[in-house]
C-alpha cells in the first residue's frame, strides 16, 4: 500500500503544530511569565528562545511546503477553494515569518548584545505584534483545513 498522502498529511500537521503551537506558547504563556523580570533578563531570555524557535519554524516551513505541494498535487486543478485559501494564508504566514526572522529579529539580537534595553523592548514589541498577526492567520488557516 502507498501511504504517501498520509505521510505528507502527518508531516504537514506536525509542522503546523510546531509553528502555531509555538506561537501560542510564546504569546500566551512565555511572554506573560517573563513580564516581571528585569529587562536585561527578560529580553535576553526571549531573544534566546526566539532564536531556537525560529530555527524550528524554518524546518517546519520546509515540511509544510513540501507536504503541502505533495497534497496539492493529489488534488490537481480540482482542489477545493478551502485548500487554495489555506495555501494562500500559509504563504502569507511564511512571508510574515521571513519579515520577523530576517528583518526584526536581528535588530532585537543586536539590541540585546549591546545591552540597549530600551531598543530591545521596542524591537520585542514589534515582533510580538507581527507574531500576533501570524497567530491569527494560523488559526484561520487551521479553520480552513477543518473545512476542507
Image: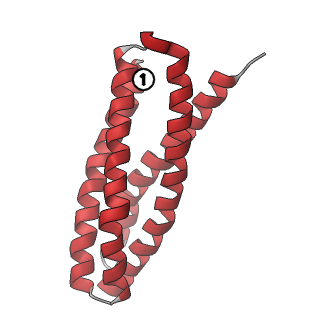
Question: Residue furthest toward the bottom?
Answer: 115
**Residue at image x 39%, y 59%?**
26
Q: Nearer the viewer, residue 37 or 132?
A: 132
Q: Is residue 34 left or right of residue 8?
A: left
**Residue at image x 36%, y 25%?**
144
Task: Please tell me in which quadrant of the rendered image residue 88 appears.
Answer: top left
**Screen quadrant of the N terminus:** top right
Question: Residue furthest toward the right?
Answer: 1
Badge 1 marks a residue whose secondary structure is helix
Q: Is residue 77 left or right of residue 111?
A: right
Count of numbered circles in the view: 1
Image height of 140 relative to 96, above or below: above
Q: Residue 73: x percent and y percent?
A: 53, 20
The answer to whether residue 38 is seen in the rendering is no
Within-10-Å neighbours for mark 1: few <14, some 14–19, many 20+: few
**Residue at image x 71%, y 22%?**
3
Question: Residue furthest toward the top?
Answer: 78
Q: Residue 146: x percent and y percent?
A: 42, 23
**Residue at image x 34%, y 44%?**
93
Q: How is the image coloured?
A: secondary structure
The answer to whether residue 80 is seen in the rendering is yes
Q: Residue 148: x percent and y percent?
A: 42, 18
- Identify the residue position indicated by label 1 in the image: 146
Q: Residue 60: x percent and y percent?
A: 53, 47
Amino acid at each position: 500500500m502507498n501511504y504517501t498522502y498520509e505521510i505528507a498529511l502527518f508531516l504537514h500537521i506536525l509542522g503546523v503544530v510546531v509553528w502555531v503551537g509555538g506561537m501560542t506558547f510564546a504569546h500566551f504563556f512565555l511572554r506573560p511569565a517573563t513580564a516581571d523580570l528585569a529587562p536585561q533578563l527578560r529580553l535576553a531570555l526571549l531573544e534566546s528562545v526566539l532564536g531556537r524557535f525560529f530555527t524550528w519554524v524554518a524546518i517546519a516551513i520546509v515540511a509544510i511546503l513540501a507536504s503541502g505541494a505533495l497534497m496539492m498535487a493529489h488534488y490537481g486543478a480540482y482542489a477545493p477553494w478551502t485548500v487554495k485559501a489555506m495555501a494562500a494564508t500559509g504563504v502569507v504566514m511564511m512571508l510574515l515569518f521571513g519579515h520577523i526572522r530576517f528583518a526584526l529579529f536581528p535588530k532585537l539580537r543586536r539590541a540585546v548584545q549591546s545591552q540597549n534595553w530600551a531598543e530591545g523592548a521596542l524591537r520585542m514589541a514589534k515582533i510580538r505584534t507581527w507574531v500576533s498577526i501570524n497567530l491569527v492567520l494560523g488559526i484561520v488557516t487551521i479553520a480552513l483545513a477543518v473545512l476542507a
